[in-house]
Amino acid sequence: MTPGIAELTPGWRTRFAPAPTGYLHLGHVVNAIYVWGVARANDGRVALRVEDHDRSRCRPEYERALLDDLDWLGFVPDEGPTSEFRRGASSWRQSDNEWRYAAAITALELRGLVYTCRCSRRDIARLAGDRPNEETRYPGTCRDAALPPDASLQRRVKLDGPAERFFDLLLGPQEQLPGAQCGDLLLRDRLGQWTYQFAVAVDDLEQQMDVVIRGEDLLASTARQRALARLLGRRRPLHFLHHPLVRRSDGEKLSKSTGDAGVRELRDAGRTSAEVLGEAAHLAGLIDHARALDQEEIPGFFRQG
């Protein structure tokens, strides 16, 4: 099920990293099953990280709810315990570690890799032209403009490297060219917020992650995060495993924004944690039909052979 994972040194580290922008849904449960299942079956350790870099969308009540839901479902992290988040500041909560991202961007600035950008999304879309079903690529408008640093303007990093070739632990060999996919990567937006791509690259480096286990919708982000990690000084390998997404009947992925299959609603309806785990495992194709599923069964889906 997970080719190549057995080659990792016992005690390798991965993370479950929800963003508290809404309540957990079954898609999150599927990801948690993969994260804890792969780790428990292959001598890995799981850290819980709260990715609340987007201050405009994250809410304390959502964080409290996701911690409660994880406890209820029986997903117990080896690092970043839920009790630590409830007590107050944590090294595993992004908003409590702004210094980490400020230090990282300063290091890139000192090497001449970061520049100020004033382009809006509308500007970029207009310059990129009509490209249906394709990611909008930043065309480098401000790269050589030498705009002075300004807290109200964006900051980007130059991505000039070659194609990234890597082996996904589930999907096999991959090749991506980040400069052609997205152009120079946004690190900080005009609201002064760190972007997802930058924050996770810094965190995965500082927290010494070995494996990233996530949905296949983030596969296209892998090369840019690998390239950024190297610019930040990463030397140890970072492995990736992208699992299939849980989709609605219309083919769209489950989403907090559309209110899909919330764990909270299932709990309120009287479902047990084992029933919710079983429904998620069934949606993920790990079992043939929805049934009550014990936590002890999950690692068995991911053992070698």
Image (cartoon, grey):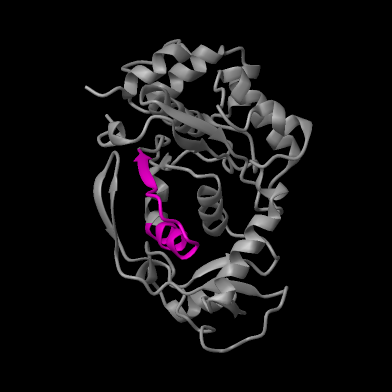
Residue 215 in the image: x percent, y percent? 41, 41
Q: Quadrant of the N terminus?
A: top left
In which image quadrant can residue 110 be found?
A: bottom right
Q: Quadrant of the C terminus?
A: top left
Highlighted range, magenta: 223-243
Between residue 256 and residue 96, name the one nearer to us: 96
Q: State left or right for residue 160 relative to residue 93.
A: left
Between residue 226 and residue 195, name the one nearer to us: 226
Tell me: residue 289, above or below residue 89: above
Q: State left or right for residue 79 relative to residue 31.
A: right
Residue found at x 62% / y 33%? 80
Q: Would you say residue 64 is visible in this rendering?
A: no
Tell me: residue 178, above or below residue 124: above
In which image quadrant can residue 20 be found?
A: top right
Residue found at x 34% / y 17%? 300
Residue found at x 46% / y 65%? 231
Q: Would you say residue 6 is visible in this rendering?
A: yes
Number of numbered markers: 0
Residue found at x 40% / y 13%? 297
Between residue 92 and residue 272, name the one nearer to us: 92
Residue 188 in the image: x percent, y percent? 62, 66
For this orientation, the residue located farthest to the bottom is: 145
Residue 37 in the image: x percent, y percent? 41, 25
The verdict on residue 9 being magenta is no
Residue 281 in the image: x percent, y percent? 40, 22
The verdict on residue 230 being magenta is yes
Tell me: residue 225, above or below residue 148: above
